[in-house]
Image (spheres, rainbow, N blue to C red):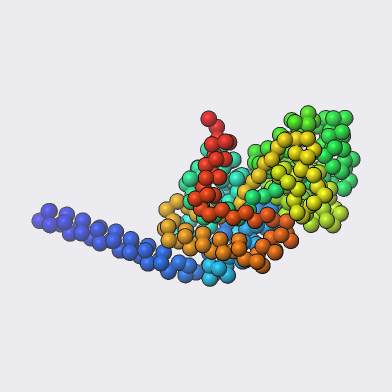
Amino acid sequence: MKKLTRLITLSALGAAALGVAAATTASAADYPAKPVTFVVTWPAGGSTDITGRMTASYMSNHLGVPIAVVNRVGGVGTIGTRSVLDAPKDGYTVLVTTVGNQVLQPAARDVGFVPRDFVPVGQISARTMLIVGGKDQPYSDAKSLIKYAKANPGKATFASPSKVLPWRAVMKFAKAADIKLKHIPAKGDAKSLPMVLGGHVGMASLGDVSAGVSHIKAGKMNAIGIFSAERHHALPDTPTMKELGFDMVLVPWTGLAVAKGTPPEVIKKLSDALKKTTEDKAFLKFAKNSGTSVNYLDGPAFGKIWDRDWNTYRKK
C-alpha cells in the first residue's frame, strides 16, 4: 500500500512538472501577450533614462506591445538591478543596464548579484562621457580648469554618482593633470545637472553627451572635455581628452538584459526587436538629435563586453 501511495505521489509530481514545463513553453511561444516593463536604475532625465525611454518608444512597434519605463533608483543602480532578478523570469521585466550597475558595483562590493546572473539581450549604445561646467565658474574649458585647479587645490568641485565610470573618468583626468578636485555625490546625471545649473557645484561628469547637449547649445553650460576616441557629432567643437594631451578613452555602454532563467525563445524575440529598433531610420534620427550614439551588438557580443569589463574592474 505504501509503495502504491508513493508511486501515485511521484506520478502526480511528474505530471505537475510536465504541466509547468508545458505552460512555460506555451507562454514563451505566445510572448509577448501583454505590456513589457523596462527598468531604469537611474533617475528620470539622465542619459540612461533618455536611452531607455527612446528605445522603449520605438521598440514597442517592433515587439508588438506597449513598453512602460519605470525608474527604480538607489544603491548606485543596484536596487533596480536586483528588482529584475526578483521578478518572474518571463521576459516582461527587462533591465536597461549600464557598466555602472552591471559591472562596477558588483566588482567593488557585495551587492547580491554578478553580471552573469543576467543574460544579455543586446547593446544599444556605446556612450560618450562628458564633463560640463557652469557658466558662472572661473574656467570654461579643460585648460582654464587645470590652471584654476592648480592655483586653488580642492576648490573646483564636480558632481557624479560615486564609484561609477563618470567618477572614475574625472579622477583619472585629475591625476593625469596633477590637480585636486572635490567630488560631490549625486544620484545620476539628472541630479548632477541641476547642481551645476544652480551653481551648487562647478562641474558634472555625465554618463553621456545626450544628458548635457541641450544645456550646452542653449548657452547654460560649458563643455569641458569628452572621453571618446573622436569628437562627438553633437559637440564638434569640444576636444577629446586625447587631443588635450591625456591619453584616456573611456566608453560606457547601455543595453538590455533579462534575468538568467528567462526562456531562450523570449530572449530571441527581445533581441530581434532590439536589432530592428536600432536599424529603424526614425529611431536613428531621434537618437542623433538627442546626442545618443547607437552602437548595436547582439547578445553574445554584448556578453563579451560584460566579461571584458568584469575582468578589468573586479577585485582580484
Residue in view at x 47 percent, y 60 percent: 268
Q: Answer with the quarter of the image where residue 161 lies.
A: top right
Q: Answer with the quarter of the image where residue 312 lies.
A: top right
Q: Position of residue 305 (x, y in %)?
A: 55, 45
Q: Nearer the viewer, residue 295 or 15?
A: 295
Residue in view at x 78 percent, y 31 percent: 177
Residue 143 located left or right of residue 232? right
Residue 186 located left or right of residue 78? right
Q: Nearer the viewer, residue 131 or 15?
A: 131
Residue 134 visible (yes or no)? yes
Residue in view at x 58 percent, y 51 percent: 97
Residue 198 visible (yes or no)? no
Q: Can you say which quadrant of the picture contains the N terminus?
A: bottom left
Q: Answer with the quarter of the image where residue 286 lies.
A: bottom right
Residue in view at x 80 percent, y 44 percent: 239
Residue 86 located left or right of residue 59? left
Q: Position of residue 285 (x, y in %)?
A: 70, 64
Q: Position of residue 269 (x, y in %)?
A: 48, 63
Q: Position of residue 301 (x, y in %)?
A: 52, 49
Q: Nearer the viewer, residue 27 or 79?
A: 27
Looking at the image, is 272 positioned above or below residue 73? below
